[in-house]
Image (spheres, rainbow, N blue to C red):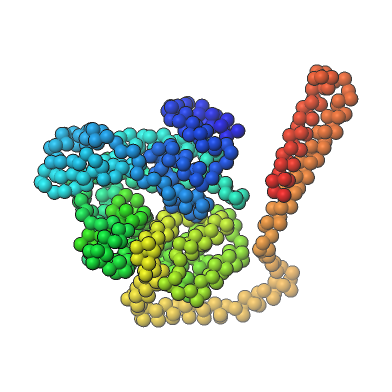
């Protein structure tokens, strides 16, 4: 059935001039991984790796959406290989000369043939400019945009095949995921955008002495080639090397956490993929690499995020519920009582917990799980923030176990509150609230009088919201549908049996054709009914 559906999509793909070779390759990979017998997290990861660099990048982006992807799939997709088969040095030179429309030797005195890294979208080489300055050249894979765009079209066409169903009955909207992945991937493929991200990041952190990012060679940077400063440092997870050089890992961890909290809470402009390979230590400073994928928060999102943190600190379930509803996107009617109970259950698990032992990743996963159960989605910025926080906490736990991100966040917000507290402004706000309360209190007697008059005249109406009644009604609706299918099946069976006693023409094996169709229809309906009953028990 799945392969039949894919073949149907292949005809549509051919009609839109999509490469049939690529389509056959995808079908071959899916067939080779036995997708017709179900999809597991590991199988999905292997399929994406088999399909090449484009799908590896898509899988990496998918892993950052725990709010719409089952957690077991996110955890597995994080394992996707970052390194892919490198391009030949001749191809790299060809791309450089084509982009600059001149010989590579006119710009670079030397380019190292062996790449520093080869990822799904670009390849990085160490080089030296004619001026003698050491740089890093990031070269985009030729034709990667067209290949990825083609794969995206195929994914959209084959979205029904790539639906992942967890052990729950929730089915993911893959079209939405693909659209978001394509948007983020296009950002990474535009190196001018990455260069702008570096400029913005430098501007936001210009007053932070211990934080920097690579300087961009603006005159040599294009949409497909990025030339930036060569960073001679040590990756943050090389703890032994850093300790041997005299670095205090706890101090580094505190500075790293403080800067990431600043990026989120103050700037609303944060590194979306803070894994160890993107965080280096140079001369005692933290250098952030690979700013191609950046998360951005609106002023409203930052405000709601602050409220959520305050709610965690104060163990305030009501405020946390309001924050979740304000940040989230409600896809259907929310059962507020059940949502409150679920959030309260999670919050109670952390009552009396010391910030130093609080697991941010676990807390975020639980809150995202609650949102998912209640069909509450999140904007890409919030989802990327959740994944980024989980990733950074993992870095801190492995490199600087004494440092806790929530503790840093709490201290930052307390300091921010003291810094921005204005007594006169607070008093003025309180006066306004008191005035509004007084006005409403004056209106209460008149409103009560109106209610009594309407009640006496029989005009009072009461609106009831029976929370929790949706599920029983849904179950009754399913029961009625099954009953209707049963009645139709019985009618077809009885009607066909009556027709079978006649000599109606035409006939098949002595049975009127109309009766045969009736029996077949009854058999199909009965089979579906039995399958539904057995499936849902």
Looking at the image, residue 390 sits to the left or right of residue 129; the answer is right
- Specify whether residue 230 is in view: yes
Quarter of the rendering containing residue 456: bottom right
Looking at the image, residue 535 sits to the left or right of residue 373; the answer is right
x 42%, y 49%: residue: 79
For the N terminus, the image quarter is top right
x 69%, y 53%: residue: 474
Q: Foreground: 96 or 464?
A: 96
x 54%, y 38%: residue: 35
Q: Count the marks: how many? A: 0
Q: Position of residue 26 (x, y in %)?
A: 47, 33
**Relative to residue 444, is residue 506 depicted above or below?**
above
- Specify whether residue 409 is in view: no
Q: Position of residue 382 (x, y in %)?
A: 43, 57
Residue sitting farthest toward the left = 131
Q: Position of residue 139 (x, y in %)?
A: 26, 41
Q: Foreground: 414 or 126?
A: 126
**Relative to residue 518, is residue 236 depicted above or below?**
below
Quarter of the rendering containing residue 416: bottom left
Looking at the image, residue 32 sits to the left or right of residue 525; the answer is left
Residue sitting farthest toward the right = 501
x 70%, y 69%: residue: 460
**Relative to residue 308, is residue 533 depicted above or below?**
above
Q: Position of residue 27 (x, y in %)?
A: 50, 32
Q: Foreground: 156 or 80?
A: 80
Residue sitting farthest toward the top = 506
């Amino acid at each position: 059935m799945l392969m039949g559906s894919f073949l149907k999509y292949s005809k549509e793909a051919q009609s839109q001039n999509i490469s049939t070779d690529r389509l056959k390759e995808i079908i071959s990979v899916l067939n080779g991984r036995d997708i017709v017998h179900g999809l597991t997290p590991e199988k999905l990861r292997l399929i994406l790796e088999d399909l090449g660099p484009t799908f590896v990048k898509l899988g990496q982006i998918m892993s950052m959406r725990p709010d719409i992807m089952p957690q077991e799939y996110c955890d597995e997709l994080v394992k996707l290989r970052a390194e892919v088969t490198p391009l030949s040095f001749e191809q790299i030179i060809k791309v450089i000369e084509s982009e600059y429309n001149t010989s590579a030797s006119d710009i670079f005195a030397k380019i190292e043939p062996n790449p520093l890294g080869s990822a799904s979208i670009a390849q990085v080489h160490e080089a030296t400019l004619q001026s003698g300055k050491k740089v890093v050249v990031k070269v985009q894979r030729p034709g990667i945009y067209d290949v990825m765009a083609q794969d995206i079209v195929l994914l959209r066409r084959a979205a029904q095949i790539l639906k992942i169903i967890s052990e729950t009955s929730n089915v993911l909207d893959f079209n939405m995921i693909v659209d978001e992945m394509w948007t983020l991937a296009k950002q990474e493929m535009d190196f001018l955008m990455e260069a702008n991200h570096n400029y913005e990041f430098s501007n936001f952190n210009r007053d932070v002495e211990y934080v920097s990012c690579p300087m961009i060679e603006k005159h040599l940077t294009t949409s497909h080639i990025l030339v930036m400063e060569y960073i001679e440092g040590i990756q943050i997870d090389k703890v032994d090397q850093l300790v041997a050089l005299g670095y205090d890992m706890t101090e580094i961890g505190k500075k790293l956490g403080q800067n990431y909290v600043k990026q989120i809470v103050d700037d609303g402009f944060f590194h979306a993929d803070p894994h160890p390979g993107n965080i280096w230590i140079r001369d005692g400073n933290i250098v952030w690499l690979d700013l191609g994928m950046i998360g951005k928060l609106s002023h409203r999102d930052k405000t709601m995020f602050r409220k959520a943190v305050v709610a965690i600190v104060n163990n305030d379930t009501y405020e946390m519920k309001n924050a979740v509803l304000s940040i989230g996107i409600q896809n259907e009617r929310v059962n507020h009582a059940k949502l409150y109970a679920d959030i309260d259950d999670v919050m109670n698990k952390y009552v009396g917990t010391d910030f130093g032992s609080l697991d941010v990743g676990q807390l975020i996963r639980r809150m995202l799980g609650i949102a998912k159960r209640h069909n509450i989605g999140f904007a890409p910025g919030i989802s990327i923030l959740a994944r980024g926080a989980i990733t950074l906490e993992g870095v801190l736990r492995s490199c600087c176990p004494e440092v806790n991100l929530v503790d840093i966040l709490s201290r930052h917000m307390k300091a921010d509150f003291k810094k921005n507290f204005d007594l006169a402004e607070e008093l003025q706000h309180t006066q306004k609230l008191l005035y509004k309360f007084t006005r409403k209190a004056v209106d209460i007697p008149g409103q009560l009088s109106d209610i009594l008059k309407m009640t006496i005249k029989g005009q009072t109406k009461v609106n009831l919201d029976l929370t929790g009644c949706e599920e029983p009604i849904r179950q009754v609706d399913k029961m009625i549908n099954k009953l209707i299918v049963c009645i139709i099946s019985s009618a077809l069976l009885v009607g066909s049996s009556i027709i079978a006693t006649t000599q109606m023409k035409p006939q098949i094996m002595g049975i009127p054709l109309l009766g045969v169709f009736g029996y077949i229809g009854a058999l199909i309906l009965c089979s579906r009914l039995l399958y539904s009953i057995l499936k849902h028990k």
